């Protein structure tokens, strides 16, 4: 067996994950398969690359040398393909993903303006975990992903990230006739007796984050409905439940959207891309386009516009 790039990536992934089991999950392999491959690699290099313990694995001195050199090789290969992609924008279209944010309406046009000559396809997902999986498996070139603070999604090379918006508050939506709709902001603890609509894409940690915030406020949320993306809006308007919402969306008819006092739920936006497919110049252009798309929709919710203007440190750096 000859050593190839796949083996180098596997060794680096094990080192980054600190566990053969976690590395297997990231690479989409079974633990026995990755263990067998690792043993063959160790036979080729002439020694153990990791020491095993109950807490995971640690690189041996030989392992540290191999990992350091492997990262150099992989970095050069990733840069090579990224540079070739930049040099010939017509090689393929740009496969772009985006969380279900208000700015999806502007993403294609704004990124197209920043990166002329590329045809752009757009995949919208309620779950950032699904976008991360699509990036990992080469189904997307880049994506704008929303994450809840404390529930970040792990991304591994060749996927890299750059923060677009470092923090923004999550708002709550309720029926326009709800008694709390008269308040400028709502305390999460005042929603203890409400029926909740589960956040879309719960596999990205959003549902766990909701439960954690509610528990910190002294109650367990009654998550009664599971409605993907915008399907929960009629339930809110009918007074059947409340739900957390992205603050940039326009307020649907029959509902009220209010900030949560103390910002118990905070999100952030990151641009993620495959550096083996997208070079530095193209990545910078995509970032500018995504930033412009996001800012196009700040005024869709006047309450969020007030928050945005009061927090200039959260604005994208371009």
Image (cartoon, rainbow, N blue to C red):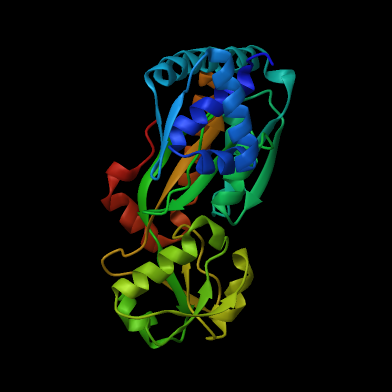
Q: Residue at x 34, y 81 (%)?
A: 219
Q: Is residue 318 above or below residue 75?
A: below
* For residue 258, side relative to residue 20 (left or right): left
Q: Is residue 309 above or below residue 156?
A: below
Quadrant housing the C terminus: top left
Question: Toward which corner of the image does residue 18 lie, by quadrant?
Answer: top left
Q: Position of residue 264 (x, y in %)?
A: 32, 65
Q: Is residue 87 above or below residue 167?
A: above
Q: Is residue 179 above or below residue 264?
A: below
* For residue 81, side relative to residue 93 (left or right): left
Q: Position of residue 35 (x, y in %)?
A: 58, 34
Q: Residue at x 47, y 16 (%)?
A: 66
* For residue 9, side relative to residue 51 (left or right): right
Q: Position of residue 58 (x, y in %)?
A: 39, 31
Question: Toward which corner of the image does residue 9 lie, by quadrant?
Answer: top right
Q: Position of residue 137 (x, y in %)?
A: 66, 37
Q: Is residue 198 visible?
A: yes
Quadrant housing the N terminus: top right
Number of marks in the image? 0
Q: Residue at x 58, y 44 (%)?
A: 25
Q: Is residue 104 visible?
A: no
């Amino acid at each position: 067996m000859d050593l190839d790039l796949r083996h180098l990536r596997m060794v680096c992934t094990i080192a980054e994950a600190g566990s053969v089991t976690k590395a297997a999950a990231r690479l989409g392999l079974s633990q026995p398969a990755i263990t067998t491959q690792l043993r063959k690699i160790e036979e080729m290099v002439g020694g153990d690359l990791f020491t095993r313990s109950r807490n995971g694995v640690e690189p041996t001195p030989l392992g540290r040398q191999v990992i350091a050199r492997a990262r150099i090789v992989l970095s050069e290969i990733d840069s090579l393909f990224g540079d070739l992609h930049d040099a010939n924008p017509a090689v393929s279209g740009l496969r772009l993903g985006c969380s279900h944010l208000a700015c999806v309406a502007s993403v294609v046009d704004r990124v197209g303006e920043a990166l002329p000559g590329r045809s752009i396809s757009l995949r919208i997902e309620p779950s950032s975990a699904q976008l991360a999986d699509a990036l990992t498996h080469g189904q997307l070139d880049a994506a704008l992903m929303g994450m809840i603070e404390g529930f970040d999604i792990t991304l591994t090379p060749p996927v890299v990230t750059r923060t677009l918006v470092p923090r923004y508050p999550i708002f709550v939506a309720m029926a326009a006739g709800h008694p709390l709709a008269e308040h400028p902001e709502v305390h999460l603890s005042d929603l203890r007796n409400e029926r909740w609509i589960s956040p879309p894409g719960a596999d990205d940690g959003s549902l766990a984050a909701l439960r954690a915030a509610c528990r910190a406020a002294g109650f367990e949320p009654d998550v009664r409905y599971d409605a993907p993306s915008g399907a929960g809006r009629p339930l809110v308007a009918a007074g059947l439940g409340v739900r957390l919402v992205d603050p940039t969306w326009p307020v649907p008819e029959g509902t009220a959207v209010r900030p949560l006092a103390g910002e118990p739920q905070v999100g952030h936006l990151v641009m993620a891309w495959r550096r083996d497919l997208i070079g530095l110049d193209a990545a910078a252009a995509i970032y500018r386009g995504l930033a412009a798309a996001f800012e196009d929709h700040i005024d869709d919710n006047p309450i969020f516009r007030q928050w945005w203007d009061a927090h200039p440190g959260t604005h994208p750096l371009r």
